[in-house]
Amino acid sequence: MIPGGQPNMQQLLKQAQKMQEDLAAAQQQLAEASVEGSAGGGLVTATVSGAGELRALKISPEAVDPEDTETLADLVLAAVRDANASAQRLQQEKLGPLAQGLGGAGGGIPGLPF
């Protein structure tokens, strides 16, 4: 701050640019990260990116019963939900501190998941 209570615009712009760079780096890390979720004791495993994009789905042969496809569908959904929950925790870990620096709760910035 300079005398008279006026904010130093150059300093504010530098801080905003640094926060933007940090946010871009965190988003890149999330896009490159992989997290897994599973269901049925590991019969179905889903892999998603840190941003929540489904990358892989593994289904153990023991999970496949042609007479009971509903259970398999439930296992797939549960595994994907588990993986997405892990991705959300990773997002909070990577982006949470940045959001706090912007005034908390996403700082009103569209695209932040919280």
Image (tube, rainbow, N blue to C red):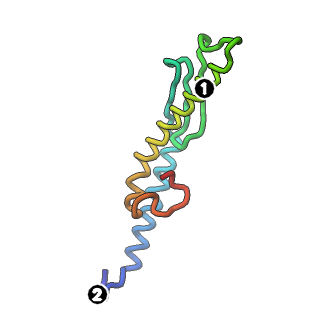
Q: Quadrant of residue 97?
A: bottom left
> How many residues crowd around disc 1 within 10 Å: few (fewer than 14), some, or many (20 or more)?
many
- Asked which secondary structure carries label 2, the reply is loop
Extreme right residue here?
Answer: 66
Of residues 52 and 68, the one nearer the viewer is 68
Name the residue at 56% across, 21% down. Answer: 44
Q: Position of residue 21 (x, y in %)?
A: 46, 59
> How many residues crowd around disc 2 within 10 Å: few (fewer than 14), some, or many (20 or more)?
few
Extreme left residue here?
Answer: 3
Q: Position of residue 59 (x, y in %)?
A: 60, 19
Name the residue at 68% across, 18% down. Answer: 69
Ranked by sequence position, the earlier of labels 1 and 2 is 2
* Disc sitting over residue 64 in the figure: none
Q: Position of residue 108 (x, y in %)?
A: 49, 63
Q: CA distance from mark 1 to mark 2?
A: 62 Å
CB atoms at circles 1 and 2 under 8 Å apart?
A: no
Of residues 21 and 52, the one nearer the viewer is 52
- From the image, which quarter does the N terminus lie in? bottom left
- Relative to 42, say whether 49 is above or below: below
- Relative to 104, say whether 75 is above or below: above
Of residues 57 and 78, the one nearer the viewer is 78
- Relative to 17, say whether 83 is above or below: above
Question: Is 37 positioned to the left or the right of 101 in the image?
Answer: right
- Asked which secondary structure carries label 1, the reply is helix
Q: Identify the amino acid type marked 1.
A: Val
* Disc sitting over residue 3 in the figure: 2
**Which residue in the protein does label 1 denote?**
76
Of residues 39 and 31, the one nearer the viewer is 39
Name the residue at 70% across, 11% down. Answer: 67
Name the residue at 36% across, 80% down. Answer: 7
- Relative to 108, say whether 39 is above or below: above
Q: Identify the amino acid type marked 2.
A: Pro
